[in-house]
Amino acid sequence: MSVQRLGLVFLFGGLIYAAFAADRLKIHSQDNHFVYLADAFLSGQTELKRRPHHGNDWASFIQLELKGSSVEKHGPSVSGFFTRRKGKPNQFQTLGKTLIDIPKADRGKQISRNYVSFPPGPAVLMMPWVAAVGYGTNDVVFTVIVAGFNLVFMLLLLLNLRELGYIERSDSDLIWFVGLFGFSTAVLWCSVLGQVWFTALVVGLAFHTLYLLFAFDCRRPFIAGLFLACAFATRASLVFAALFFYWQLFVGQRDRFDARERRIKFLAFTAPCLVVGLALLFYNYVRFQDPLEFGHTYLAGGHIARIRDFGLFHPHFINRNLTAAFTLLPRLSDGYPYLQLSKHGMSIFLTTPVFIYLFFARPTGWLKWGLWLPVIVISIPLFLYQNTGWEQFGYRFILDVLPYLILVLAVSKIRLTTTFKVLMLVGVLINSFGAATFQRSYAAPLYGHFMSEEPRK
């Protein structure tokens, strides 16, 4: 396919996303966390230079100067937060996760330390723009542009698989799959908002798709590893996508490579992942004295009860997450607007009806497990996570595994019948409705609270 046609795909998709974004294109979103982080990086620091303009989903803790007897026990100062547990008003949790008691009489000056808890990939991409424009950098425009490129990346991936012999479909069929990917899934409404949560998903999807483009048949191990590193530097859960490459190399296509080739490809792929991974661990340690802490423990100053009581990942959250992903449906009501959508989202089979075909798709050869294993492994932490994805129109975390689901359908023998195309178009209409109404003031009565309600993303 020619460069001109790829350019048309980008232009067509970008214009559609821009049309749904509409007036949002005029100014950055209220949740432009990555702009703040890019500004901090440009100043050579990880702590934010400017105090956040609201309190939603920033990581923060206090540096507390001590007086009296507490100085002898804990030193001149400690960093962390008061836990606010009932019956324990003086309990303080340090960055080292130690619980200590600090009486009010021993408390001196407090300094708030503020950070962005999300992995820094999008902020790094934004740095040139922020260097030129500053805090006025428009994260909505940035996200729309990346979303337009995502359509091109998916088309290139499908064309590559056809060239390698994994797909036997016409150009027309491939365009249908790109349409399914970009407009009949959560990609559509996630791409038109800006905001830290959705920007991270859209950028992570871009790097993830590029990773798969170079990872098939282990043809470009270093480039594949570099894009995977960028992916998990944007969405931490995507570190598990490495399984796709390693499965090919050591199991699925093991016979294609001799021992020396396997060793070289392993090292070439692993090296960039290891370098970026260690950099991320160091980045976390500098901020929170814990290499595995991106900062979500310190959301709302460490005072989110479910995180305090269960941690970020726990079986306690599985039921809610499975409900949000697979079974949550709108509710009918007697009064206006007669339909209620949960801010926890909707079943992926409602927002993308074509996914019903996943039950009948049968990839062959090494792809049978090569495509499904990453979906399973990436999904495990998502279903254990303390958050359903709130606030969302559909299940937004589907973007972390979406490329594999599209490929499962594309490489299978499923024909693009009239029924398939009609279901896809139904998904386009549903997600278009979400793109037009989600987080719009005129549509606020449509959205309500089902399941347990924690008004935080």
Image (cartoon, rainbow, N blue to C red):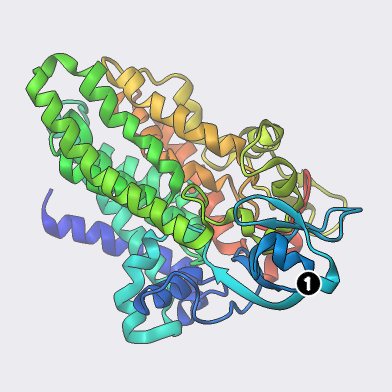
In-front residue for pair 153/387: 387
In the picture, measured across the screen, residue 185 lies left or right of residue 448, that is: left
Coordinates of residue 419 in the picture (x, y in percent): 45, 31
The amino acid type of the residue labelled 1 equals Gly
Residue at 24% x, 42% y is 225
Q: Residues within 10 Å of mark 1 (few under 14, many from 20)?
A: few
Coordinates of residue 300 in the picture (x, y in percent): 68, 63
Query: Residue 408 occupies which quadrant of the picture?
Result: top left
In-front residue for pair 90/25: 90
Query: Residue 320 occupies which quadrant of the picture?
Result: top right
In the picture, measured across the screen, residue 225 lies left or right of residue 381, that is: left
In the picture, measured across the screen, residue 367 lies left or right of residue 264, that is: right
Coordinates of residue 160 in the picture (x, y in percent): 17, 38
Question: Could you tell me which quadrant the C terminus lies in?
Answer: bottom right
Residue at 46% x, 56% y is 284
Residue at 82% x, 58% y is 84
Tag count: 1
Coordinates of residue 325 in the picture (x, y in percent): 60, 37
Residue at 68% x, 48% y is 344
Identify the element where label 1 is drawn: loop
Query: Residue 121 occupies which quadrant of the picture?
Result: bottom left
In-front residue for pair 392/415: 392
As drawn, 132 above or below 294: below
On the image, numbered disc 1 is attached to which residue?
68
In-front residue for pair 325/167: 325
Does the rendering let one see residue 418?
A: yes
Q: Residue furthest right?
A: 87
Does the rendering let one see residue 425?
A: no
